[in-house]
Image (cartoon, rainbow, N blue to C red):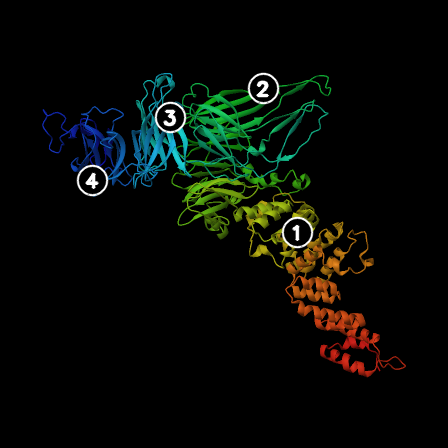
Amino acid sequence: HSLIFLEDLECLVCASTAGIYTLDPNSQDVECVYQPNINTHQPEPANGVTGSTIRACAWNPQLELCAVVVGTELVVLNTEFIPISRIPLDIDDDNGQDSSSGACVMSWNGNGTSLSLSAVYTNITPKSTSLRQVRIYSVLPELQLQHVGLSEDGSGGLVTHLTPPLGWGGLHSSLIAGVVQTQRKHFVALFEGCNALRHGQFDLRTQTNLASTNSGGVVVTVGQLAWNANGSVLAISYTNGAVQLWTRNNYHWYLKHESRFTNIHDEMTATAPVLQWHEEEEYSLRIVCRCEIRELSFHWRVDCSNTLPQTVTKNVANVTEASPSTASNVRSEAEALVAVIDGTDLKLTQMDRAIIPPPMFAQAATFSDAVVAVAFCPNSNMNPPLTLITSSHTALTTDRIVLVTQLANGSLGMVTEQLTVAGMVELPHPYSAGGLRQLTVSHYSVLYSVSSDSSGAVGAAVAVTVALHTLQLVGATHDDKLLELTITASRTNATDDDWLWEVEAVDTLTVEDTILCIVNHSNDDGNGALVELSDGTLLDYTHTSGILPREEPLLEPCTQIAIRSNSQTTTHDNATHASDDDDSYNDSPDPPPPTSDLVFGLTSRSRLYCNEILLSTSCSCFLLHPSFLIYVSFGSKYYLRFIPLVLLETWDPYAGANDDEETMALLQHGYEPRLVERGSTLVSIDPNRSNVVLQLPRGNIETIVPRALVLQFVLQKLQSQHYKPAISTMVKQKIDLNLICDYQPAGFAANAKVFLECLGTGEKGMKFLSLFLSSLFDGDITQYKYPLPTWLLGDTTSTTNSNPTESGQPNARSTFDFTTKINHVCQTLRTLMMAKRRTNDEYLHPILSTYAKETPPQLEAALSQIILNSTPASPLTSSPSSTPAPPAPQLLSETAQASIQYLAFLADYPMLYKAALGMYDFNLAIAVARNSQMDPKSYLPEIRNYQRTFELNPARAKYEIDVMLGRFESALRHLVAANEHEPTAAGTDGVVEPTFFETECLPLIQNQKLFRLALELFPPY
């Protein structure tokens, strides 16, 4: 019934049907410490119980209490095997003749205070004299029945068709798992430990149908249920030698792993393996099968394809010269592809296209057996789909292989970027039986082999032999050998969809220790893999050189590792936009000298290392970004931290006091850390959108855009003159648009024409341009709101730049006057827009923004643009000077009103109203006032008064308006002009009478001190 080792007694305790025995490992002495009275001829032991045999035995997790079912009683023993409590059971005593259908099974809860018992109870209902039930008994402070397993539908019905296997979750789980077997279904029923009500279920899935007889006459049933220490994984063993691991997420149960410890020929004699989880290590499982004991260690891993921020070019092969070469920029079908293992289904979701929370998914690839491992092809963005154009102009396209799966039977399956299964191959003997423990794709290539008719005529037959897919895989066998495989796919007819898949074991290498992890990487010698042994030793494996040991091992064995080659970190940004402008790319600064590769490792104790540097002691997960190491740190709060890879390359851990405070702060806290929810796990990163996908503890998916990735992404786009995606990202993420010109002020002025061309003249481009102009202010935003560290400037300035002399270096920044930034930017862009516009409507709002944002605001010039736009002749071919003043209905049009409202957004309505009056255009003033909050009773009489005066004497009306606006010099000039149109008592010599000068002009001159202007306007008497 049970076999354990008690450290307090230093002996091995074995519970059998006849009794409980102890074995001293040193002296090999066997002692019977507890024996029920089976026959009346034997004397009764001092602490024994009269009755039947021991039908079940289970120790609590603390190994302090032992529960045994003896006959029809449940007895609890202490470590001295003395009964401390007992309770009668309503079960039959069959005197040791228990069958599998009538067996009793017990399971304790995590804290050892309650136990569950699955047994066939009698006198349940009048119609059913016996029925298997799950009952919960409390042990402390006394043994008593607490709950009986019932249905969850509120009817209080009994759960029928239960079988003996039973398992209670660990310390952090209250679920009790039992197996229900019917004629049609075989599933696990879950009971709540607090009330024994059934709460959920999931169907069991195996290669052989459960509870049914296969061709060999073997009935497969469940042998044991076992929860791990924290209750997150349920292990199930079957009588055919299979072991499955199940886990729950978002109310769905996933079959994550299946191992086979027997083959089809041994199923007649196979038994269910015995399972036991480690008490402290949550994912360490001991399996006893036949004459061997295996200990397996499992680790959680997120399977996601690598997404590189670079333009993917579709390659087109040409058969004849009649087919011109073409190329187009396409987006890979498998970027940010996440694979979720669930039995025979591999659930795939492209996180860059749709955030679908589990258990839902975008598409599933179904296999013939359970999937146990997934390996993505390296550099998925670097291997685009290929299209072959024949002489008959027939396009033949084949999709890339994006991942390779390993099944429980040892087969390998290939999945294309269309998320379909391309083919299956079986591992060569003798690796087909047990499969591989670790698997990675170290190299992937796609090739065409084409031959055509010698005549070369258009439409001639083309013989195509296509050897398209070649995959090189590296895996770890169960005997800790490194196995290199080559998988090829070929076909002899280009129009045939049937592929010939072949696998070959190229080489087998022996290592000195157990292989812990294998990851793919690229180096200067070619594609290969990085191998980590159980002692932390790192080995480089290449197809040409074999195994090469690394000089610096990891300080601790790491369950998850990743590598970033020096070629990837130093030339990544240069390669990002090299295809956009080859000349400017060649003129960019040379990359820094290469350094050693960065190897990152995460231990089972949450320590994160970079080579020999300990970065964090509280890391739950990490992923690599092209510019950052991103990881989640836990503590009182959970943070998403970003460590620059450039900083890790150049930082010397032995420099000591020479390190500056900025470097140490970045290594400790990261750049712009982001607070996340407790228990968040990194799923994928899309550097093309600066998105980070997280999975929360309850299972749902959340996408965030951290400020660190946004700033780095925006600066790269600005440096490469991709202004439209940069400003689009800044608007979405509420980044101050002044960064566009403050990052490289002199360079932005030189590239202003490129800036306008990138935004275009569409509605969206005009909105971005107007928003940029309206947000300008005099000052450098990089000095306080977005301080740019030196490592970030060095990382972005290594990209493409059309004018290196204006690249925003410190000397160019120091010569730029930020106090006049608004006027400088507005005048530069307005000059270009006025030259580029083809109609008056084009660039209207941005031009209004440039006038309104200048210091001082040029509102009259802006209103003049509105008047010009409201004229019937909108093309610029008509001369504005020859066009008469627009009538009032034109200013009341929808376009004019929208322009006035937009201009009022940048300037206050009172200022705009006064500017319209200052232009002496009363129709414009009414149009402005109509869109304001002004009371018509206040402005209409005023404007009508001006209009009546204007009809009699225009200069007099302008004088009154100038006085109201405080433009006194203009008022004095208009006052003099008004007197010329009014009747005066002028003398014969034309000199103005003193009466007019003294009554109107002199007070204005004296109050406003306009003496110099008065001497110019009035000749001496």
Q: Amino acid at mark 2?
A: Arg
Cα distance in 3D space between marks 4 and 1: 78 Å
Which comes before the other along the chain, label 2 or label 3? 3
Query: Horizontal placement of 141 versus 248: left or right?
Result: left
Residue identified by numbered label 4: 143
Q: Which quadrant, please, contains the N terminus?
A: top left
Report if the CB atoms under discs 1 and 2 are less than 8 Å apart. no
Secondary structure beneath dot 1 equals helix
Which comes before the other along the chain, label 1 or label 2? 2
Residue 535 spot, x, y in % from top left: 39, 33
Which comes before the other along the chain, label 2 or label 4? 4
Cα distance in 3D space between marks 2 and 3: 44 Å
* Mark linked to residue 769: 1
How many marks overall?
Answer: 4
User: Which one is in front, 774 or 129?
Assistant: 129
Which comes before the other along the chain, label 4 or label 3? 4
Q: Which quadrant, please, contains the C terminus?
A: bottom right
Residue identified by numbered label 2: 491
Which comes before the other along the chain, label 4 or label 1? 4
Q: Amino acid at mark 1?
A: Leu
Q: Nearer the viewer, mark 2 or mark 3?
A: 3
Cα distance in 3D space between marks 1 and 2: 54 Å
Residue identified by numbered label 3: 184
Secondary structure beneath dot 2 equals strand
Q: Can you say whether 395 is above or below 967 in the image?
A: above
Which comes before the other along the chain, label 3 or label 1? 3
Q: Nearer the viewer, mark 3 or mark 1?
A: 3
